[in-house]
């Protein structure tokens, strides 16, 4: 048995067989059961046939439009498909080593590159580009419709634990999560969308285990603890038994909070606080209801773009998803955030391989550039709300616009939404539909009062607000130590937001990850926030903290915190609350 320690970012304990995905989760490796060998060989043959057909079509087209000489490049690539060192070699590896087709093909390609390099032959070295082309095409054709990792997981015996260098949210969204029990990543961060998703599904995650994709062999048994960050590889029977007990304890601690689910969140001195849930996958709405959420405070609709096929975001398909959510939650409110996606999500990512463009064309900026995707979504949202209103007599939808930078931008966005509704004959249906703004850019925070006049409600995205305030990329693990929710600069902005929204009498909530941390929620209550939206499993934990909190003490604490010299000084201020919470969690008397 070997033990590693990373950083636990999504609590829970899990055991399962490793699926290793190197290079941004596109290179998947797994050992096959004897019964899986034929299926993998068949996939390889199908990929070769599909590749051959595509190359012949391209060759014919080039020959017609450009000329036969240029078409011969593709004829040469077609011949490579019959090279005994490529597809046939991969086939032999599947049989001999019982490895999946993707892995076998990758091995054959690497060996062939080695041969090319060793021979030092000019003709061969000119063929390196062709080899890369044809092997890339073969690899894509192994899984033509799906992300290879998501597809593979569907075929494996559960439970599995995915080990990846970095797992893009667009890939994670396609997983069958009933099979994936845990995640181990070399890089990542607590506010990475993949981690947020796993947390909301109750799947433990350990990040920061550099070299994990090399050190862990596909098929090895893993035990992971998403709280402590421990990862045990090939645990002995004894250790497995201890980990099972650990998992049982974690489950028992959560079910001890069950009786809180039906109770409203009220502080010890009687201040009512509203707790709503964040949601990423529409089908997971049962978790929201089970947690006792008072509504959905944030549905990250861009996860729809990752469903695996561009058709899943057609207007009617979206109406069905949104109406289903509204019906399941009625009469509780549902906040749907319009796609917070730049070029890293959805159909564009399909073509480019995806790249998160943090400062580029994302959120409402993308919508304002006459993005057809935004127009379709707005029509679908209005139609879904209208259908629910007809069925139940009251609309429960709230539309939230991400990445708003200024009051003027909000005004433009509303104008555009009104125009989209008019063009679609939905102007009457739009009336009364609340449209709110995310505050997650410092410029928006600094002008909350002006923004509040243009928005029906506001929701603070602390994940991005912290990132942009402190100039710390939230997904860059090298900067993890600088990503600090308690930084006085962040707290001052939060106070400004609370004061600005109150002055305009606008509903205000916090939906970033800060809202899922009971200690930070105490501070936020002190700053004046009364509404929070968080991952469902955090709701009872935050509620328990609020029941014991005195809001007047929290206010005094917050006053000191915004004037503190450093995040460390804020930590010190919060220590007594943290100690009291800990004592309650382990069942000790608080002042004994
Ligand atoms: C945020 O930025 O805090 C937020 C809630 O949005 P996301 O995490 O999806 O960027
Ligand atoms: Mg955000």
Image (cartoon, rainbow, N blue to C red):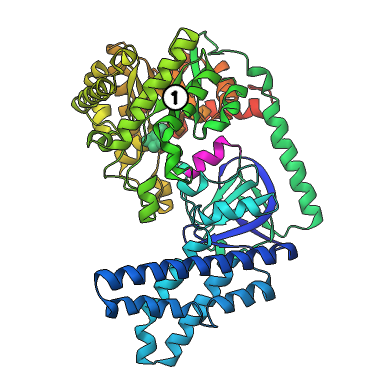
Specify the quadrant that holds the C terminus: top right
Please indicate, yes or no, whether residue 170 appears anywhere in the rendered image.
yes
Q: Is residue 414 left or right of residue 484?
A: left
| Image quadrant assignment for residue 434 | top left
Specify start and end residues of the magenta stretch as a single range: 194-202
Q: How many marks?
A: 1
**Place of residue 525 in the rendered image (x, y in percent of width and height, measured from the top left):** 44, 19
Report crowding for label 1: few under 14, some 14 to 19, many 20 or more residues within 10 A (C-alpha). many
Q: Is residue 379 magenta?
A: no
- On whether residue 201 falls in the magenta region, the answer is yes
**Which of the two residues, 562 or 450, is positioned nearer the viewer here?**
450
Q: Quadrant of ligand 2?
A: top left
Residue under the image location 58 percent in, 49 percent down? 183
In the image, residue 587 sits, relative to residue 71, either above or below, namely above
Q: Secondary structure at mark 1?
A: helix
Q: Residue at x 81, y 53 (%)?
A: 238
Q: x%, y% of residue 104?
A: 58, 71
Q: Is residue 569 visible?
A: no
Q: Is residue 518 left or right of residue 315?
A: right
Residue labelled 1 has its Cβ within 8 Å of some atom of ligand 1: no
Q: Nearer the viewer, residue 235 or 117?
A: 117
* Magenta span dominant secondary structure: helix
Q: Is 371 positioned to the left or the right of 584 in the image?
A: left
Where is residue 549 drawn, in percent x and y? 53, 17
Residue nearest the observer in this picture, 264 or 128: 128
Residue drawn at x 52%, y 60% as measured from the top left: 210
Indicate whether 372 appears above or below 182.
Answer: above
Q: Quadrant of the N terminus?
A: bottom right
Q: How far across and how far down the image is residue 283, in percent?
A: 56, 32
The residue that disc 1 covers is: 523
Q: Residue sitting at 32 percent across and 20 percent down? A: 435
């Amino acid at each position: 048995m070997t033990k590693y320690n990373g950083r636990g970012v999504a609590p829970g304990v899990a055991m399962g067989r490793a699926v290793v995905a190197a290079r941004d989760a596109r290179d998947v490796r797994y050992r096959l059961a004897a019964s899986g060998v034929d299926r993998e060989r068949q996939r390889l043959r199908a990929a070769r046939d599909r590749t051959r057909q595509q190359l012949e079509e391209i060759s014919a087209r080039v020959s017609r439009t450009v000329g036969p000489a240029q078409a011969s490049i593709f004829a040469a690539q077609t011949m490579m498909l019959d090279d005994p060192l490529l597809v046939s070699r991969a086939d032999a590896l599947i049989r001999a080593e019982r490895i999946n087709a993707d892995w076998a093909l990758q091995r054959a390609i690497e060996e062939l590159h080695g041969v090319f390099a060793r021979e030092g032959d000019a003709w061969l070295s000119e063929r390196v580009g062709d080899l890369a082309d044809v092997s890339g095409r073969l690899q894509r054709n192994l899984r033509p419709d799906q992300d290879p990792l998501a597809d593979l997981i569907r075929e494996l015996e559960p439970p599995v634990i995915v080990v990846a260098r970095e797992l893009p949210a667009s890939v994670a969204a396609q997983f069958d999560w009933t099979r994936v029990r845990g995640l181990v990543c070399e890089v990542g961060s607590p506010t990475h969308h993949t981690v947020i998703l796993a947390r909301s599904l109750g799947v433990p995650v350990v990040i920061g285990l550099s070299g994990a994709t090399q050190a862990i062999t596909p098929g090895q048994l893993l035990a992971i603890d998403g709280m402590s960050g421990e990862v045990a590889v090939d645990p002995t029977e004894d250790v497995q038994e201890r980990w099972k007990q650990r998992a049982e304890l974690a489950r028992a601690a959560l079910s001890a909070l069950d009786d809180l689910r039906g109770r409203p969140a009220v502080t010890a001195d009687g201040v009512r606080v509203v707790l709503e849930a964040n949601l990423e996958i529409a089908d997971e709405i049962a978790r929201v209801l089970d947690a006792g959420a008072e509504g959905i405070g944030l549905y990250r609709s861009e996860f729809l773009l990752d469903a695996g096929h561009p058709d899943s975001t057609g207007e009617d398909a979206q109406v069905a998803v949104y109406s289903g959510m509204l019906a399941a939650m009625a009469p509780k409110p549902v906040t749907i955030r319009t796609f917070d996606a730049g070029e890293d999500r959805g159909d564009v990512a399909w073509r480019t391989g995806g790249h998160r463009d943090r400062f580029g064309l994302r959120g409402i900026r993308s919508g304002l550039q006459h993005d057809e995707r935004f127009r379709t979504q707005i029509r679908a949202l209005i139609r879904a709300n209208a259908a629910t209103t007809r069925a139940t007599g009251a609309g429960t939808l709230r539309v939230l616009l991400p990445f708003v930078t200024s009051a003027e931008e909000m005004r433009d966005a509303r104008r555009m939404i009104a125009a989209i509704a008019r063009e679609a004959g939905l102007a009457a249906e739009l009336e009364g539909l609340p449209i709110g703004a995310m505050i997650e850019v410092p410029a928006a925070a600094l002008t909350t009062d002006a923004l509040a006049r243009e928005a029906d409600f506001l929701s603070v995205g602390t994940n991005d607000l912290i990132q942009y305030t402190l100039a710390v990329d939230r997904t860059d693990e090298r900067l993890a130590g600088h990503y600090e929710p308690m930084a006085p600069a962040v707290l001052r902005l939060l106070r400004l937001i609370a004061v600005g929204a109150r002055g305009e009498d606008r509903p205000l909530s916090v939906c970033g990850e800060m809202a899922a941390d009971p200690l930070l929620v105490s501070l936020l209550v002190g700053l004046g926030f009364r509404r929070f939206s968080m991952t469902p499993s955090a709701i009872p934990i935050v509620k328990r903290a609020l029941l014991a909190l005195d809001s007047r003490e929290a206010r005094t604490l917050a006053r000191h915190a915004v004037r503190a010299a450093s995040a460390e000084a804020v930590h010190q201020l919060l220590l007594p609350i943290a100690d009291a919470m800990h004592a309650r969690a382990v069942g000790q008397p608080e002042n004994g």
